[in-house]
Amino acid sequence: MSSLRPFGLSTWLAAPAAAALLMLTPVSQVPAYAQTAQASPAPTQAAKPAPASPSQTTVAATSPAEQRGLTSRAIDKVKQVAKSAGDIFSRVPCLSPKGGSKTMGSLPHVASKLVAGKPVVIVAFGSSSTAGYGASSPDFNYPNRLAAQLRRQYPTADITVVNAGVGGEDAPEMMKRLQKEVIDVHPDLVIWQVGTNAVLRDLDPGDTAKIVEDGIARIQAAGDADVVLVDPQYSPRVTERPESANKIVKLLGKVAELRHVGIFPRFEVMREWHEKQALPVESFVIADGLHMNDWGYACFAQLLGDDIIRSVGQIKLGVNVPADVRTYRPM
């Protein structure tokens, strides 16, 4: 993702659309990084008043400090409710691609660990849409949403999802930290989100694909880890460069085929939200025209988690998914 700060509402985000966006998000859209940096201390509990004298026992008024405490607790309660698994989809559901889709293929290492009840480590590797820029809080970034879904599905499993997202990076920068932040963690699954900043920075798509291919080869040589690539998001800042965006999407698909790894085609999935499910772009992308909002991250995580859960089911049933269908196509 781009490291640029979100700019003001662009021409494609009109007032009615902005109202629709507010209806779709459970809490206000404040970038996660900014919110973290500016977070205020948790409200302190109001001091208990001194015991009332007999003449004061009929006074029922609440002090301003107590009112503030009650208000803070009420706000916290609302936020907790908004973070529940289904609440974010209460107005707009997260639907699978119309007409069905091919699975991304089996993920034998992570699936076998889950079936055996062994600890599972997943590394979410990428840029700002992995870090969660645009989410209203860290709870709503996609790695945390994915972790919550998998823990609900496998409540006795020890599941760790490591967020290794750094805003503004693409393949060249990610390769510099691949060893330390991915390989040395000994993951069972690596979800590598890449390519958006290559489009925004006019990097050569062929060079990007070659770097990603080399990175996957290093991960595979280092140990038993499944890999899933995630291509760029469908958003105005990306689609305004259609030639570059289409090239990087196609080349990442070819890399996945060549290295026999999974690919989650985020670009096509998000395009379907807009073109086939008739969702306004501003209902899943924030005002900077680039990063996803809470609903966008949540639906992305949900669909990705569904594929992981499906793979576990295949392992349990003894289904051997051939490598040549390790591509997820929303057709």
Image (spheres, helix red, strand yellow):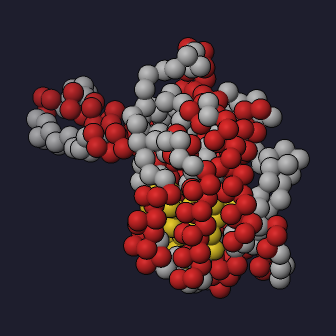
Residue 98 vs 56, above or below: the answer is: below
Q: Nearer the viewer, residue 91 or 172?
A: 172
Report the number of numbered marks.
0
Residue sitting at x 33%, y 45%: 36
Left or right of 24 in this view: 99: right
Image coordinates of residue 83 in percent, x first then y, are: 51, 46
Q: Nearer the viewer, residue 129 or 236?
A: 236
Image coordinates of residue 282 in percent, x first then y, are: 60, 28
Confirm whether residue 205 shows in the render.
yes
Q: Quadrant of residue 104?
A: bottom right
Q: Nearer the viewer, residue 16 or 173?
A: 173
> Residue at the right extreme?
99
Left or right of 275 in this view: 300: left
Residue 276 vs 107, above or below: the answer is: above
Left or right of 298 in this view: 127: left
Residue sitting at x 61%, y 67%: 213
Image coordinates of residue 76 in percent, x first then y, are: 39, 41
Residue sitting at x 82%, y 67%: 325
Confirm whether residue 88 shows in the render.
no
Image coordinates of residue 119 in percent, x first then y, are: 54, 80
Left or right of 284 in this view: 166: left
Residue sitting at x 50%, y 27%: 287
Q: Nearer the viewer, residue 162 or 171?
A: 171
